[in-house]
Amino acid sequence: MSSINLKNISKYVCKNINLEIFDKELLVLLGPNGAGKSTLLNVIAGLIDYEGSVFFNNKTIDKLPANKRRIGYLFQELNLFPHLDISANIAYGLRVQKNPQNEIKARVEELLQIMKIKQLSSRYPKELSGGEKQRVALARALANFPRILLLDEPMNSLDYRTSKYLRTEFKILQKKLGITTIYVTHNFYEAEEMAQRIAVLDRGRVEQIGLPKEIFFHPTKSVNDFIGAPNILTCDYCNRLNFGLVEVKCGDISLAVSSEREKIKKVAILPEDIYLSNTRPPGPDVNRVRGELTEINESSSTVCCTVVTEKNSLKVKLPQEIFTSMSLDIGDEVWLILALRKLKIITDGE
Amino acid sequence: MNVLRKLKPGWGIIPVAIFLGIWEIVARLNLIPGHFFFPPFSTVVIEFYYLTVNGVLGHNFLSSLIRVLIGFSTGSIAGLFMGIIMGWNRVTDKALSPIISLIYPIPALGWLPLLMLWLGIGEALPITIIFICSFFPILYNTATGIRTVDKSYIRVARTLGASDMKILITVVIPLALPNVFTGLRLESGMAWRVIIAAEMVAIPTGIGALMMKAESLMRIDIIIVCLIVLAVMCLSFEKFFAFLETKLTSRWR
């Protein structure tokens, strides 16, 4: 059992934060920069002084120093010890805790195996790629059998593919190990992919907490400002196709969405996940719709437009230079493409 | 480029050989007015041989070497120790920094008149001078090295269960090694420069004293022998610490 309870935590930007993380849960702390996410992790780890109380399994740990809290913490910069080879990095926590040598060896071997980095054991951090460093840092954080794992934007420095791959792997590993985890990110898609629950933090307050879909479909106003208000379409017709695809109709928009369930109530998509074109896009008339440009709001780097179709109205966000290159004006005819992988759905029973 | 690369292992010997050749020719052909003061290189080599065989050079060299070894090792150990304490502990740092900052800029030889009166002319004098010459710069470099270790490594070590003492020993000191070695390398050479100066001024034995005796006898060849010994020793000490630094840190830096 490893549940965490935060009661009235106040530190820096954080004000009176109350949060409960259940045993074996993977909770994602989502929020913009400066929201207080890392501060909250540092409070749990005992790395900074704070007001309020932190409970592990209903017992307060406020008086425990950081080195006695048994927390695995993966920092944003990873901070592998440059002077130690990979095995020694992983073994560090076990060594300083004076575990017997044979136990240390066995645990390091086990972690090298789990993280698939056996071949790196005698290398030094400077000789590793970003993804490899990530695995080593995670192995090191797990070595001491921590009660809780804290991950502070660990995929930030990685390219999209590596980070996506590692996220999937980590999710499987977290389930397998059953370790209570708090994962910090500012990216909604990353949060949605990882989380069992998401807690949205903004300006030091928990603005909303819930399942990823709850956050996406029913965001509070401030959460809306952060992740962006999605376009939500109500479905009037569903038809199951092959390969986990369902054909749905939302007014005049015909969509193919990936879903195992047939009954889909609503479909949502963020404005930045809709492509806008001034010419008719090639391909079938699925996930595409024709409309009229009725509103244009330009900011420094992006343009937000409203496109009205026969029966729907959709918000679209696109980079300024792309919008300018199309020379569009209000009243012009445009085509929208709704990216299949970015469509979120609510099915019956959710 | 390829030719240069092939020459690399021993290329440094070529300019030295050319220099010695020119020296020999210039001295032999009396190209410098007052050639009495400018013996050829071969004369210096012969004198080096005589001084070695009759034990004069060995005796004086050993005196200087022992002083340097004792002064430098005690000074650097004390400097390392104090540097670690000052770099790690803010209170000690705040308490001692003003005094250290005040004393540090005084050149080691500046202490000579004071130490001559306090300690008298004896072995303690040059050793203390070397001690002072090594202690402050090594303290300064070590403290800076310890202080500038990225704090995030300390946070990581703490979350992994390490106590403050363990963090210092297993993370901070190893990561401060490059700075520490910079201090050791520079000061090991400096110790030789200072001992020669001290011996020239106040001590009757050692390479510096031999140089002063040679000067009074107008033996330029002996002076040059002593200077060559000094150059070789400075270089060897610096190279030794550079080698040690490479050995201990090159794998991970």
Image (tube, coloured by chain):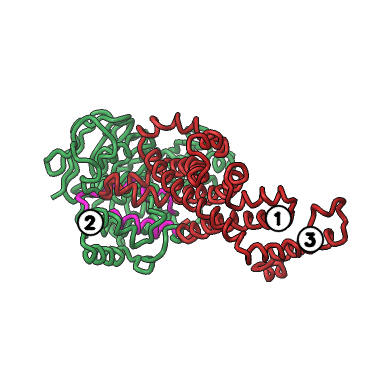
Chain colours: A green, B red
Q: Nearer the viewer, residue B240 or B173?
A: B240
User: Could you tell me the amino acid type at mark 2?
Assistant: Lys
Give, as a single range, the part of the protein colored magenta: A129-158
Chain name for mark 1: B
Check disc 3: other Cα within 10 Å, few if <14, some if 14-19, many if 20+. Answer: many
Between circles 2 and 3, the one closer to the viewer is 3
Chain name for mark 3: B
Residue A132 is one of the magenta-drawn residues:
yes
In the rendered image, residue B188, in percent from the top left (x then y), is placed at 53, 51
User: Could you tell me the amino acid type at mark 1?
Assistant: Ile
In the rendered image, residue A261, in percent from the top left (x then y), is placed at 24, 56
Residue B40 is one of the magenta-drawn residues:
no
Along the horizontal axis of the image, is A96 left or right of B9? left
Mark 2 and 1 residues: CB-CB less than 8 Å, in contact? Answer: no
Residue B149, picture quadrant: top left
Please name the residue shown 29% across and 59% down the image: A91
- Residue A303 visible? The answer is yes
Residue placed under numbered mark 3 in the picture: B40
Using the image, tell me which numbered label, if any, was put on residue B224: 1
Q: Tell me which numbered mark, 3 or 1, is placed earlier along the sequence.
A: 3
Q: Secondary structure at mark 3?
A: loop
Please name the residue shown 74% across and 65% down the image: B17
Work out which quarter of the rendered image holds the N terminus of chain B and state it.
bottom right
Q: CA distance from mark 2 to mark 1?
A: 58 Å
User: Could you tell me the amino acid type at mark 3?
Assistant: Pro
